[in-house]
Amino acid sequence: MTLPIIEKAIAHGDRLALIDEGGAYTYAQVLVASHRVASCLLGAEADLQEARVAFMAPPGLEYVAVQWGVWRAGGIAVPLCLAHPLLEIEYVLDDTGASILVAHPDFEAMLRPAAEERGIRFVLTTEAMDAAARDLPEVDPARRAMILYTSGTTSKPKGVVTTHRNVTAMITSLIEAWGWTEDDHILHVLPLHHAHGIVNVLLCALWAGAVCEMLPKFDAETVWQRFAERPLTLFMAVPTIYGRLIRAWDEASEGTQARWSEACAAMRLMVSGSAALPVSVLAKWQSISGHTLLERYGMTEIGMALSNPLHGERRPGFVGLPLPGMNVRLVDETGRVIDEDGRQGEIEVRGPNIFLEYWNRPDATQQAFRDGWFCTGDISVREDGYYRILGRSSVDIIKTGGYKVSALEIEEMLRTHPALRECAVVGVEDPEWGERVCAAVICRADETLTLDALRAWAKERLAPYKVPSRLQVLDELPRNVMGKVTKPAVKALFIATADERR
Ligand code: MCA
Ligand code: AMP
């Protein structure tokens, strides 16, 4: 059985598929490259049989060749974040029990020793893409395709396992809802270790036979210049990125502003998601680009669930209606389904998009479902069928720059700092990041800590977006009568001193 995305690519043949810093590649070329990678990974084996293959490759041909190569060889793709420090990478290697690690030569110095220490086979992308092609196995779409790490209410990130069937359902739902066609051309600026960048942008484009143009990393000026150069039809990003684009536009000369705004007119759709889009950003973007951003709601475990319509009313402050194939309901604290509009409850979802399991965590998987519905932890109300997100059921989940991070995970790491006795981490509302990771700490006797020192220490241990960017050194943490730290009171301390922001 040929995997659905591969079948699609075969049909797209000589059409242009990818543009990256190194060049432009047709679907046929991507297929050849991924066939070589699959052959290399297989070695003498007939099928990787869901072996976990971790990989670190920059956005572009190499990333796709490895992702598809792993799939075509029967393995599970585990994309690694280019900006993660070694400790985070090692956690993923150990948690997935990866048996192969594929890396671009730029990352060899960091990753080869970690692989060798663990007895993991280390393969360079250059080596894999040079291998001689051989017969590939049949891969059933019911098999596991991908593990993406997501932070939650547990201290350590969990691996979200999706099957090929799940991924296909995520893609086809968006193809239908957002009207993707082979005439589309999207600019890709998102990280490739999360569903937003992997599924909504990259895989939807390649499924549709469209062109996916990948930048090495987001940069506002580069994106505006790219908008102005050649007609693109689609753009998708998180609210922080739209905020940065607005700032760059505001700082540009009048002539440049006019040119940039005009370039947006050629596009057919601009989408925002991963975090709440402030209505002020939506309005400003409308005045700059003429586009009403289409806001949608999703989660690593479910792909996309709700979306404002492609045609029809896009309601500011709302994330829209259920997407094709998705069942969405609201449930109150007692577990009763809320039928009427206007009452708030937790969003639960059901459908072919929903992930298979948390990797190696059967209890967590079981707890995440109620009667076959996935419990998102997001609180919402519905008005005329449109959902509006009000917040989350846990204060310990923070959304910053579109990334979900766990306060508990950051606290656990900070507690290992030699100068710290206690700490509490909170997400504080912020115009740039949505929420900003803030740490209140108590130092050990005779110890002090500055924000710069804490950040330098934490950057070696945590992803850049998890590193606290504000610090308060206290004598006591606010606690309730039970002695438990009261996070709302910690947040209030940061809000009260917002002007002292670094
Ligand atoms: C980075 N920095 C931060 C943060 N992130 N400071 C405060 N809060 C943050 N969140 C700091 C770094 O430590 C560094 O500081 C400086 O900013 C530059 O770091 P860099 O990594 O270069 O940041 P950036 O490139 O400016 O990042 C901004 C960004 C990025 C482009 C908006 O956050 C981004 O790509 N976000 C998208 C995330 C995403 O795709 N999420 C989807 C997951 P210093 O200068 O001191 O070193 S959600 C999902 O997939 C579901 C399914 C969904 O619904 O979509
Ligand atoms: P992740 O775990 O990174 O997949 O993030 C999923 C979470 O992002 C959801 O549970 C929501 O809390 C949040 N999210 C995604 N899209 C939106 C949106 N449009 N508005 C508000 N929150 C969102």
Image (cartoon, rainbow, N blue to C red):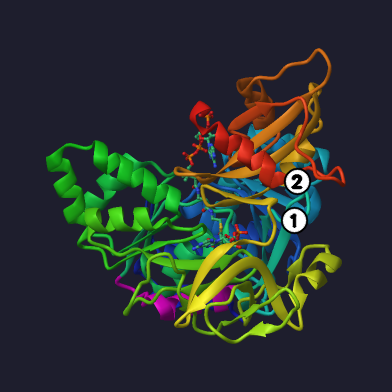
Question: For the residue carrying disc 1, how many other residues have a C-alpha within 10 Å: few (<14), some (14-19), or many (20+)?
Answer: some
- For the magenta stretch, what is the residue range? 167-183
Q: Which mark, residue 71?
A: none
Q: Quadrant of residue 208?
A: bottom left
Q: Is residue 177 magenta?
A: yes
Inspect the image, locate mark 1, and give the three-letter code of the amino acid beneath it: Thr
Residue for badge 1: 153
Question: For the residue carrying disc 2, how many other residues have a C-alpha within 10 Å: few (<14), some (14-19), or many (20+)?
Answer: many
Name the residue rendered at 74%, 45% in the picture: 486
Q: Is residue 143 magenta?
A: no
Q: Secondary structure at mark 1?
A: loop
Q: Secondary structure at mark 2?
A: helix
- Residue furthest bottom as drawn: 339
Residue behind label 1 places its C-beta within 8 angstroms of ligand 2: no
Name the residue rendered at 51%, 29% in the picture: 501
**Whole-percent x and y of residue 265?**
20, 61
Residue for badge 2: 408
Inspect the image, locate mark 2, and give the three-letter code of the amino acid beneath it: Leu
Residue 60 appears anywhere in the view:
yes
